[in-house]
Amino acid sequence: MMTISYPVKNGLYINMTNRCPCSCTFCLRQNADSVYGSDPLWLDREPTVAEVCADLDKRNLSDFEEIVFCGYGEPTERLFDLLEVAKYIKQKSDIKLRINTNGLADLIWGEPTAHYLKGLIDTVSVSLNATNAEDYQKIVRSKFGIGSFDAMLKFTKDCTQYVQNVVMTVVDVVTSKEEQQKSKEICEQLGATLRIRPFEE
């Protein structure tokens, strides 16, 4: 049995893929197979769009404040399937939709992707993780290499044109106060909001 959706606090999270172009040094999945007491999030295979929608039909969406595309992988690896699911949800509910992402969708798909989110995604939360390309690559270990940092920043800035709420996050235990201040300045330049999140999330 695969875990496609799982509740976390006031949100319902959707786990559509285990693929990810990064191998972040702090990634929770390196040390566990689940979060917040969920069933294991490693997928036997990727669920189809129909299977994801069927799984959501079993849930009372009014029990949740938002739906978050975030599992044990980078959700934009399945960007267009994700958007099909988002369309399905929007047809049946006015619940807010969020994507938690590493911001590398443009590199994954080889084209600008932020515009695809317009009208479907309410919040994009991008993992910033570092304030320069070298430190970023040491932390996230992207398969796309040193250019990943600038691509992530561009994606974030692009999202501000199409998505109402754009957030960037850093993890408290792997960033200093100075880095957090610099991160805030980067967010201000891009038009995003900084969130310093605890390691456990």
Image (tube, rainbow, N blue to C red):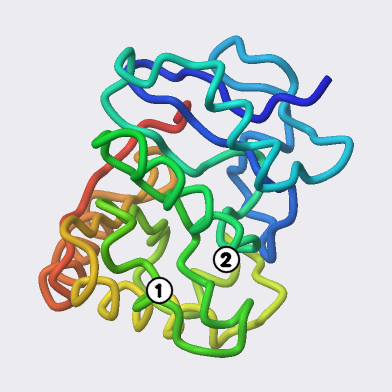
Q: Classify mark 1: helix, strand or loop.
A: helix
Instruction: Look at mark 2 in the image and give the residue it sits on.
Output: 80
Q: Classify mark 2: helix, strand or loop.
A: helix
- Which labelled disc corresponds to residue 99? none
Q: Position of residue 111 (x, y in %)?
A: 53, 89
23 and 135: which is toward the camera: 23
Compared with 196, 2 (above or below) is above
70 and 139: which is toward the camera: 70
Q: Position of residue 174 (x, y in %)?
A: 44, 46
Instruction: Look at mark 1 in the image and give the residue it sits on.
Output: 116
Q: Dot 1 surroundings within 10 Å: few (below 14), some, or many (20 or more)?
A: some
Left or right: 81, with 159 as reference point = right
Amino acid bearing label 1: Tyr
Which picture quadrant has residue 108? bottom right
- How many numbered circles does the render carry? 2
Amino acid bearing label 2: Phe
Image point (42%, 85%), residue name: 150
Left or right: 127, with 66 as reference point = right
Image point (60%, 54%), residue name: 74
Which picture quadrant has residue 178? bottom left
Q: Circles 1 and 2: CB distance less than 8 Å?
A: yes
Q: Position of residue 33 (x, y in %)?
A: 75, 25
